[in-house]
Image (tube, rainbow, N blue to C red):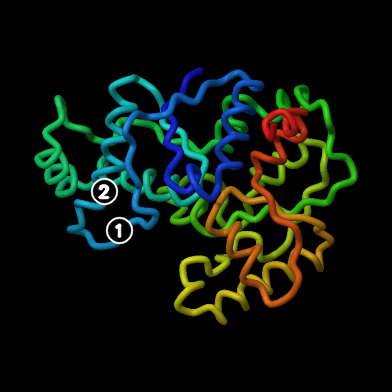
Amino acid sequence: MTYSYFPGCTLKNKAKDLDHYARECAKVLGFELEEIENWQCCGAVYPQASDEIATKLSSVRALADAKEKGQDLITVCSACHHVIKRVNDDMANVEDIQTKVNNYMALSEPYLGETKVLHYLEVLRDVVGFDKIKEKVVNPLKGRKIGAYYGCMLLRPSTTMQFDDPENPTIIEDFIKALGATPVVYPMRNECCGGYISLKEKKMASNMVDQIMASASYKGAEELITACPLCMYNLRNNGTKEGLPVTYFTELLAEALGIKEEVQA
């Protein structure tokens, strides 16, 4: 299976590990990530104004490109996934936005939200299957107690994202189990870390990070994994106390599949 792959800006700069491990693990697991040519930044934040069109165009270009190839579009970054999936929903359901965007872009045929948008984790769960991943594991992460940090963008708004239960998600915990580790469920795993306010309201963001770390530690987690580069930076750098180690979920996958050192080299 080949997917149109939208890496996004951060994965080309500050989150290269998230990208590299995703690409190499896909090869081991039997699917291909075909990077979209000339993709542009998705904007990182979904535009809330109902008449805001310009900031949605880069997402629509990527979606239309995937449609032309007859491929589903896959993302790894939580922020990119959030923006592109919500823009796609607009293009499928909001007539005013459909009309304005298609009039502006003058595509060979109108784009009306036909492309299926998937997060890498959804492909692991629904296409590859966690049972198959378990079979591919050569370095089981036995004895490690790992907490999933979902954050807010993968899960909400749930009616559009349809990623998992927004209040009690299980996809990352099931992923952790497949790698042989013990998932730790803690109350703050799906709460916002404050990443988007960390510059303007640093004290508030720091308090949010401290609460997440305390919640995970109290329940017995010894490390956290995430899919979000902004969350990664915030959790690692903006707490007031020494927190738990945080890594990308793709790095954990590469370690379990026995290719982490190879990728690093």
The numbered mark, 2 or 1, whose residue comes first in the sequence reads 1
Q: Residue sitting at 12 percent across and 46 percent down?
A: 100
Q: Disc 2 on helix, strand or loop?
A: helix
Q: Quadrant of residue 264?
A: top right
Percent x, y of residue 208: 61, 74
Percent x, y of residue 68: 28, 22
Q: Quadrant of the C terminus?
A: top right
Q: Quadrant of residue 181?
A: top right
Q: Hey, what amino acid is under mark 1?
A: Pro
Q: Is residue 32 left or right of residue 237?
A: left
Asked if residue 217 is positioned above or below residue 204 in the image, the reply reads above
Asked if residue 130 is positioned above or below residue 193 in the image, the reply reads above
Furthest residue toward right: 143
Q: Is residue 173 left or right of residue 50?
A: right
Any mark on residue 56, and which?
2
Any mark on residue 157, and which?
none
Q: Residue sitting at 68 percent across and 68 percent down?
A: 212
Percent x, y of residue 47: 30, 58
Q: Residue sitting at 47 percent across and 52 percent down?
A: 158
Q: Disc 1 on helix, strand or loop?
A: loop
Count the labels in the image: 2
Q: Residues within 10 Å of mark 1 (few under 14, many from 20)?
A: some
Q: Quadrant of residue 151?
A: bottom right
The answer to whether the residue labelled 2 contacts the one labelled 1, judged by CB atoms less than 8 Å apart, is: yes
Q: Residue sitting at 72 percent across and 55 percent down?
A: 224
Percent x, y of residue 207: 62, 78
How far apart are the alpha carbons under marks 2 and 1? 8 Å
Q: Hey, what amino acid is under mark 2?
A: Lys
Any mark on residue 47, and which?
1
Q: Is residue 171 left or right of residue 178?
A: left
